[in-house]
Image (tube, rainbow, N blue to C red):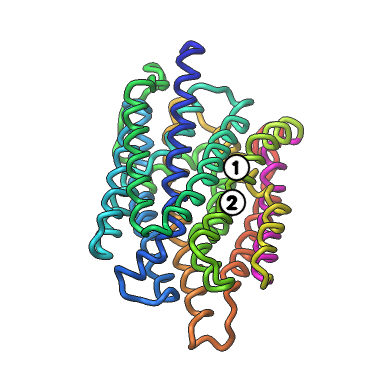
Amino acid sequence: MDQRQSRAATRFVLATVFVYAIGFGIIMPVLPQLVVTLGGVTLSEATRIGGWLIVTYALFQFLFGPLIGNLSDRFGRRPVLLLSMAGFGIDYAAMGFAPTLAWLFAGRMIAGTFGAAFSTAYATLSDIYGEEDRARVFGLIGAAFGIGFIIGPAIGGMVGEFGERLPFFIAAGLAFANLAYGFFAFPETHAEENRRPFGIARANPLGALLKLRQMPGILPIAAVFLLWTTAINVYPNIWAYFTQLRFGWSPGLVGLSLAWVGLLMALVQTLAIGPLVKRFGERVAAIVGIASGTIGFLLIALISIGWATYAIMAVTALHALSGPSLIALMSRRVPADMQGELQGFNSSMTALAAIAAPLIFNPSLAYFTSPEAPVRFAGAPFVIATVIGGIALLALLSTRRSAAGAKA
């Protein structure tokens, strides 16, 4: 692949993640109110329903993630990424038109089935870049998500003041626009000689696990990835509910806080991850990221003043190092013809974490903000996240350096 095609492919991958992040962020400030409206429930009760929406998406992503990854190893990255964008567009449109809660769940099923944007994005960049550059370029994916997450919640918070459905239609329009762009601009990156036959035995979470366990050093890092992803999912699962229940924030203020998070992620993953990984290796970068994020969980659990969250997030923003560094550690350990399978497996691990997180965090928030709770404590989910993050950190510290990559 020549430089022009490599740049075109990289631009589309980053645009895809950027658009996904905008769509994901744009609906977060208004989703609680839409659930309240369609379900006829209180905000505290809507927390549980919002959790089940996330579980629905994650369950379908868990089941179909390895299938999508294996299809990209067989047929290429281009058709899979384009199909993924189409799925997201349909999802957001269905949720925007939703007359009942069942429509919201149907939309999440569609998005979860085709939720290959991130796994195939990582596999695409693995096709283009060598091992030494992967943590840096994987950081660009995180930065694209962060920038999109600056714009998305800010737009969602402002537009949501005029109606909770409008942000969903904007997200659908962006997804379909990116689909059209990719159709004309995105070249295939997966070389024919690196493709392998499709096998249904490997196109499922168990089959992918059995195959990848043969690769030295993969499973210990995958376990850390699963634990940490579960912990960090406390934010997308409960933030909009938590800040409204704890601080009485409006959708606009929720959107502003999420935009601040996106800005911090973009800065860390654009400016910090490359130099840190080059100097210390992926393992150290992941350790710093997990430690920073775990401290942040505990601080947010204990605060009672809304503006303090901005200061805490600024101090603990290095948590954004962890995801790209852990993925790069695993990517080092598999050959070129298995990068899609690995990223599909990672997609299933991400989905498994996303299934576990709302089953843990959302009920705890709902209970500790309900009249039945012995003490009202909205920070309870962040205490739980602190414990999970601490376990992930200890697990990573216990991994052998030889299992974590050459420089780790």
Vertical relation: 346 (above or below) 109: above
The residue type indicated by label 1 comes to Leu
Q: Give the distance between the C-alpha atoms of the residues marked 1 and 2, in whole angstroms.
A: 8 Å
Q: As rendered, which of 39 and 118 lies closer to the eye?
A: 39
Quick check: marks 1 and 2 in contact, CB under 8 Å? yes
- Magenta stretch: give its range: 280-302
Percent coordinates x, y for residue 29 in the rendering: 46, 59
Number of numbered discs visible in the structure rendering = 2
Q: Can residue 227 be seen from the camera position used here?
A: no
Say which label, 1 or 2, has the lower sequence index.
2
Percent coordinates x, y for residue 361 in the rendering: 51, 68
Specify whether residue 282 is painted magenta.
yes
Looking at this rendering, what residue extends furthest in the front direction?
162
Describe the element under mark 2 as helix, strand or loop.
helix
Describe the element under mark 1 as helix, strand or loop.
helix
Q: Residue at x 49, y 42 (%)?
A: 213
Q: Residue at x 60, y 42 (%)?
A: 326
Q: As rendered, which of 117 and 60 lies closer to the eye?
A: 117
**Callout 1 crowding tier (Cα within 10 Å): few <14, some 14–19, many ≥20:** many
Q: Residue at x 47, y 54 (%)?
A: 158
Specify whether residue 184 is painted magenta.
no
